[in-house]
Image: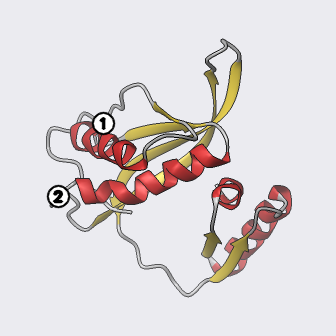
Amino acid sequence: VAAAAGGAATGVARQPRIARSYSDMRFLAADLAAELKAAGIAQINAVGPRAMHRSLRAIVLAPEEMDDELSGKVLGATPSRNLIEGEDGKNLSAMMLTIRPVPAMTVPQAAEIVVAATTKVASLAGYIAKLLQEHGAVNIVAVGDFSVSKAL
């Protein structure tokens, strides 16, 4: 996924946007692109499989909103866990994706893992770690809300 921030980038993301299960991916992508142009970094919090899937799709769409500012870079997204306050005031465990332009890389021939909605996350993590040690790279394929959520 691709983008390069302009010279005025601050390197500091504003308050992370929150993706919901009903978020419009095109609007979220445009918002990400604007933030990446302004700051060179953007963040999304997502709670639940559908919101995570929509967030990832917005990251894929964001470069379409960035004109010629990509300069051979791609968007890298680093996932982390985050606590956010829900609408009812309770803390929710969210997946925060921190998005930055990074140099495009050549991906070597790698093992491929297909993630299904029924894949056990702990087993997946162990298998990914093993393949990374053996091959240095892993291609992960996931289709649908629950599969993408597990892959992240």
Where is residue 30? Give x, y as percent: 30, 45
Which mark is drawn over residue 112?
A: none
**Of helix, strand and loop, which one carries label 1?**
loop
Q: Does 140 sit left or right of 59 as displayed?
A: right
Q: Does 90 sit left or right of 2 as displayed?
A: right
- Relative vertical location of residue 140 with respect to residue 43 in this rendering, above or below: below
The quarter of the rendered structure image containing the C terminus is bottom right
Residue 27 position by quadrant: top left
Q: Nearer the viewer, residue 24 or 86?
A: 24
Q: Which residue is drawn at 33% across and 53% down?
A: 62
The quarter of the rendered structure image containing the N terminus is bottom left
Return the residue at label 2. 67
Is label 1 in contact with label 2 (beta carbons under 8 Å)?
no
Residue 34 position by quadrant: top left
Amino acid at the residue labelled 2: Asp
Q: Residues within 10 Å of mark 1 (few under 14, many from 20)?
A: some
Return the residue at label 1. 11
Separation of residues labelled 1 and 2 (CA atoms): 20 Å
